Every structure is written in structure tokens, then in C-alpha cells.
Amino acid sequence: MDIVVCIKQVPDAASVKWDHKTGTLIRDGVQSVINPFDYNAIEAALSLRDELGGKVTAVTMGPPQAQDAIREAMSMGVDHGVVISDRAFAGADTLATTYTLSRAIRKLGSVDAVFCGKQAIDGDTAQVGPGLAVRLGLPCVTCVGEMEIMEGGAGLRVKRMCEQGYDVVEVGFPVLLTVLASLNTPRVPSLKGKMRARKADIPLWSAEDIGAQKDKIGLAGSPTKVFSTHIPKFEARREMLPGTAEEQVDALVDKLKEAGII
Amino acid sequence: MSNVNYFLTEEQQMIVDLARQITRDKIIPVRARLDETEEFPWDIMKDLAQADLFGLYIPEEYGGLGGGCFENCLAVEQMAYGCIAITTTFAASALGGYPICLYGTDEQKAKYLPDIAAGKRLVAFGLTEAGAGSDAAAIKTTAVEDGDYWVLNGTKQWITSGGEAEIYTIIAMTDKAKGARGASAFIVEKGDEGFNFGKKERKMGLRASSTRELVFSDCRIPKDRLLGKRGQGFIIAMRTLDLARPGIGAIAVGLSQAALDESVVYARQRVQFGQPIISFQAIQHMLADMATYIEASRALVYAVARTIDAGAKNFSKLSAMAKLFPTDVAMKVTTDAVQILGGYGYMKDYPVEKMMRDAKILQIYEGTNQIQKNVIGQALNKEYARK
Ligand SMILES: Cc1cc2nc3c(=O)[nH]c(=O)nc-3n(C[C@H](O)[C@H](O)[C@H](O)COP(=O)(O)OP(=O)(O)OC[C@H]3O[C@@H](n4cnc5c(N)ncnc54)[C@H](O)[C@@H]3O)c2cc1C
Ligand SMILES: Cc1cc2nc3c(=O)[nH]c(=O)nc-3n(C[C@H](O)[C@H](O)[C@H](O)COP(=O)(O)OP(=O)(O)OC[C@H]3O[C@@H](n4cnc5c(N)ncnc54)[C@H](O)[C@@H]3O)c2cc1C
């Protein structure tokens, strides 16, 4: 099995601050972490490898520091990793991101399964997985909440979670899946993995290395134009309702009626 | 947290970081529940296995990491910050595994160590009996040669991980007449004929750790399960305990640190008489003593562990000190933590009452603190006689 897992470094939600003037994130001094769903993607890739054999390669597009994310994935047991990094990639929207990732994955060679997180907690579009599947010509199942290997390793039987239930999908290899947090519990890193990761040589691939067309990457390859961003203001007010439980409920109902909510 | 520079290597820091991550993500969230239900922490044992921590002290040729006493101390200190019952389960496996590491034949090592290092099988160490606690030489369990077998009879009491572990290092009398030189060590496996488990204890603290009787009734094991030489049983037991005691000290340091952290955080936010209670000098002095004793404990444990790893020959006295002082400190610090949290500290909603209940065991197991003082005192007597 040749398995690829796409991981994204995102700002640590716990330490993020906003610049209220420009309406953007203050990225300076904010720690980067692996996108939470991507841990589940890593675990899914590793468990598939543990069952069927083969190797797992982690791929990330980002600045050179994204090597830290690859090292962390390797400390959990991922075999290899690549950072796709080039100033020319800056400003990529999902169209450019999926193009870039697909070029890198093609360069890796044959692939039987690609795992992505359902969505990144910063960009939040959930488009990269499906977009990448189209670029690679792979069948795609999104929002996978359960996964089992079919008889003889013929493919995967997965639950695609929907708003009001789930679909059970059987899909052969090669395939691309985007995964939910409920799929699994990511394993802890191991000491041997950490030691291997520390010494590992993690290649940085440039636009040229992956043979990317200049007009399809970065800002140039991104039809999405951001005109402005703003921080929504939360102006919730709080009011304590006095009295017995009945009186409080009555007062609440009145207020909801007054506000036209019920 | 400690701000002393203990000059850890990059690998040692990795061990600390990994153990801390597991403690934060896996141990702390479940400790109160496991304490309540007395459930054996299998999930966490699997995480520790996945993390390679069971192999810390085992040579690399058997799948371990080839670390020493110090690396083990670093790992258990971090885990104990979360829960010493869970840490004890981990540490007891090393207590049972050390004898195989130190005295096993090549065949025994090849047979058992890879599984132990991988955390696939837990180990237990069985010395204590109903009539033989501090006085280990009073054990009555016997092992008698019978052709190609040894036949064990007797009952071990209060054995950590009894029933859950799959490999047991057992000390039994082989030549009663020879007294302390009449004991031998054996490897017994769960499932061996005539080997059963007795009652599981219900305890004041350390509740997620299983403490159980081991019952041997004509338990037949093959000859090659003898560990070390016949008659070496107590030497093996004492050597093992000497190696393990700094680890108990490290567990005490981790527990104490957790109690201090809870205390300072609470004292800064609890307001009485219009001010945070940390502004009262009585509270500050208590915290100051706690912090100072903890750092002294840590420095002692680290220094002794490193001395052992550097190849010291006679370290019974030092390892007794590295158990005695930090565990007494842990009892005091956890008691003071409950005091600082006042009535809230006595409630199960806060973690310090468990810390205080748990701390007591550290002064009792692996040799009571009175016995540690005997060891230190006797060593001093010997050292000064030579001068
Ligand atoms: C309106 C808009 C405008 C934007 N403008 C800019 C801009 O001007 N400049 C700029 O730098 N960015 C910009 N971005 C961010 C950028 O488009 C996205 O971060 C990026 O394309 C990934 O999309 P996502 O974060 O929504 O990922 P999702 O599609 O939510 O991620 C799903 C999964 O895809 C994989 N994945 C996502 N990104 C990567 C990656 N880089 N490497 C490997 N795997 C990955 C992961 O497995 C992830 O869990 C913009 C985003 C939006 C929505
Ligand atoms: C939770 C738990 C887990 C344990 N796990 C294990 C295990 O995995 N394997 C194992 O083999 N054992 C285990 N033990 C046993 C433990 O090591 C003994 O409890 C300990 O050695 C003390 O023995 P005792 O309890 O019989 O106390 P006793 O020896 O009866 O001592 C009672 C009191 O007398 C004092 N005392 C005794 N002799 C002297 C002396 N000469 N000088 C001064 N004071 C003295 C003691 O310090 C103590 O205060 C465990 C015990 C507990 C409680």
C-alpha cells in the first residue's frame, strides 16, 4: 500500500489573537500545530498500513517550518514526509492548493490511498480533499466517521456521516478520504519515532521540483480574491431572571415572544 | 515547574516531553474516574506501550531503548504528576523486569524482554507474604526440585498488577536451612499449572492499581525458569529494589509537584478577608517550604540516579535516601495542599484529596521508610568502621 496523508499546519487556536484594525489574525508569535482533523487522517493512514503493509508519506504545503509538522507525524509512525515550499506558493486559495498538492503526490509515484482531514480549522473550506481527488482522478468519500477494511483488502467500507444519518460506502483502491474526529483516537508518538523523526531528512520541494505551472500556483493561480475581512462583534447581553422556576419560565416566554423568536 | 537546569540531553528531554504529553492528554482526564471505580488502566498501558516507554531500561538488542535508572526516573516523575496509581502499574512492570534484565540467561532474556519492552506483557514482582513484609527473609513460599520441574507452594500478598500481569518474578525458599541464602528467584507465567490469583484488595489510595494475592498450589514450572543461581533469591530482590527505589523517589517528586501547582493556582484565586489567600504570609511560607523541599527531592533523586547509571557498585544507602526523603516530602506536601485548599481540598471535586490518599503508599511500599533508615544507618556504621 502506498498511502499519502495531507496535513496542514494551522495556528494554535488556543493562542490566536486578532488585529481588530485590519481584521486579520496576528500570526507573529503564534504557535503552529497540526490541524486537529489531520491527526485523525494520520491515524487512519497508519492503521491501514499496519493492517495491509506498505508505507505512509505525509505531505504538507507550507513554509519551511512546516517540517515540524512532518516530524511530529513521523514520531507517530509515518514513514516519510515532504514539505512543498516555495515563495511562489504564497496566497494560494483552494484551487491553487489542490493543484500544488496533486503535483507533489504525482511526483511521489503510485498511490493507493490519500487521507485528508475533513477541514482545516483556519481556512475552514473543506474543499481541499474533494478538489485534490478531482485533480488526481480518484474516487472521493468525505466526512468518514467509521472505516473498515473489506475482505482480503479489496477496499474500504466506510460510513460517510451526513446531517441526518450516514451512508455506508464500499470503495476500492485507489481512493481519497476526508476524515472526522470521530473516526479514531490518534495514537501517541513513540520515543523511537521521535528519535527517527529528529534525524530524518525531510525534503523541501519547490515549484520547479514538482514541475508546477507558474500560472496555476500561489496568488497567480488563485481566482479567489479577498476584498476585506472583519471580525464579527459579539454583543450578547445577559439578564438574570428572578423568582421561582415557574415565574422565570413565564418571564422567559414573554421575552422570547416580545423578541419575535416564538 | 522546576526552573533548575538539570542539563538533560536531547533524548532525555524527549522522554520528559512525551511522558508529559501522555500525562496531560491521557492520564489526567481519567484519573478521578479510575480512582472511583478501581478500574485497571489498560488503555493507558497501551498508550505507554505505543510510546515505547516500557522499553526505557531494556537493552536495545531486546527492543528497548537502553536507558538507565535516570531515564526511568524522568518518565515516572512526569506520569506521577497525573496519577501515581497508574504510574505504579507502569513502575511495577520494571520492578518485575529488572531481575530478568540483570540476572536472566540469554535464552530467558530473548524469550521475555522483547515482549516486556514492547509493553505486550506486564510484569509483577512477588516477594511479600502475610507473615513477611519488612522481614523478607521470613517468606514461607517454597520451591522444590522435581525432575525437570520446580514445584512452588505458598501465597504471596499485595502484589501489584497481580492477575493483570502475565509474567511474575517470584522469590521462594529453596533451602530453608540456609536462611537468607536459601531463597531463589523464578519466572512464573500467568496460566502456569497450579498458579492462581486470590483476593483483590480494596485500598485507601492507589486505587487504579491492582493489588492482589498470588496463590501457588503445586505450581509446576520448567527448570529453566530459575532466575540467576539457586540461593541468589534475596540478592536478586535487594539489588532490584536498590535499582527501583530512586524511581519511587521520582514518583514522589511528580506527585508533590502536582500538589504544589494545585496549591499555588488555588491560593492566588481564593479570596478571603478581601484578598487572595496567597497574600497571607502563613500560606506563602507553606508554599515556600513545599517548593523548596520538592526541588531538594528532585535534585537528590536525579543525582543518585545518575550516580547509579555511572556504574556505582554500592548504592544501597544512596538509593534508600532517594526514596526516603522525597516520599516523606510527598506526604507533607500533599497534606499541606489539602490544608491550603481548605474544605474544598477535602472534597472530591478537587484533585488534592486523592493526592494525599495516594501519597501514603510511598512511605510504605518498596521498603517502609523506617527500613530505609535502617539501611542508611547500617551503611553509615559500616563505612565508618572502615575508617
Ligand atoms: C476566501 C479565502 C481566501 C483566502 N485567501 C488566501 C490568501 O490570500 N493567502 C493565503 O495564504 N491563503 C488564503 N486562503 C487560505 C487558503 O486558501 C487555504 O488555507 C488553503 O487552500 C487550504 O484550504 P483550507 O484551509 O480551507 O483547507 P480545507 O479544505 O478545509 O482542508 C481539508 C484538508 O485538506 C488538507 N490540506 C489543506 N491544506 C493543506 C496544505 N497546505 N498542505 C497539505 N494538506 C492540506 C488537510 O488534510 C486538511 O485537513 C484563503 C482562504 C479562503 C477561504
Ligand atoms: C499497595 C501495595 C502494593 C504493594 N506491592 C508489592 C509488590 O508488588 N510486590 C511485593 O513483593 N510487595 C508489595 N507490597 C508489600 C510492601 O512492600 C510491604 O507492605 C512493605 O514491605 C512493608 O511490609 P508490611 O506491610 O508487612 O509492614 P511490616 O513489616 O509489618 O511493618 C509494620 C511497621 O513496622 C515497622 N517496622 C518493621 N520492621 C522494622 C524494623 N526492623 N525497624 C523499624 N521499623 C520496623 C515498619 O516500618 C512499619 O511501620 C505492596 C504493598 C502495598 C500496600
Image (tube, coloured by chain):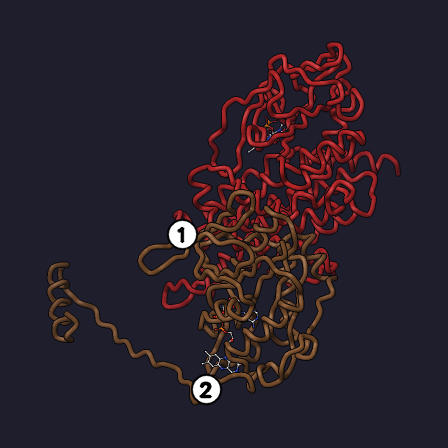
Chain colours: A brown, B red
Q: Nearer the viewer, residue A9 or A108?
A: A108
Q: Left or right of A260: which side holds B227? A: right
Q: Nearer the viewer, residue B319 or B123?
A: B123
Q: Residue at x 49, y 52 (%)?
A: A184
Q: CA distance from mark 1 to mark 2?
A: 38 Å
- Is residue A169 visible from the viewing direction of this image? yes
- Is residue B297 visible from the viewing direction of this image? no
Query: Relative to B235, does residue A239 appear above or below in the rendering?
Result: below
Q: Left or right of B344: which side holds A72? A: right
Q: Could you classify mark 2 by the number of other residues whose Cα lies within 10 Å: few (under 14), some (14-19), or many (20 or more)?
A: few
Query: Relative to A105, does residue B295 appear above or below in the rendering?
Result: above
Query: Relative to B340, does residue A31 appear above or below in the rendering?
Result: below
Task: Specify the label residue A168 is tagged with.
Answer: 1
**The residue positioned farthest toward the right in the image shown:** B387
Q: Quadrant of the C terminus of chain B?
A: top right
Q: Secondary structure at mark 2?
A: loop
The residue tagged 2 is A226
Q: Residue at x 46, y 52 (%)?
A: A170
- Picture coordinates of residue B145, whole percent (x, y): 74, 12
Q: Left or right of B107: which side holds A103? A: left
Q: Quadrant of the N terminus of chain B?
A: bottom right
The residue under label 2 is which amino acid type?
A: Val
Mark closer to the observer (1, 2): 1
Give the quadrant of residue A34. Answer: bottom right
Give the quadrant of residue A89. Answer: bottom right
Q: Could you classify mark 1 by the number of other residues whose Cα lies within 10 Å: few (under 14), some (14-19), or many (20 or more)?
A: few
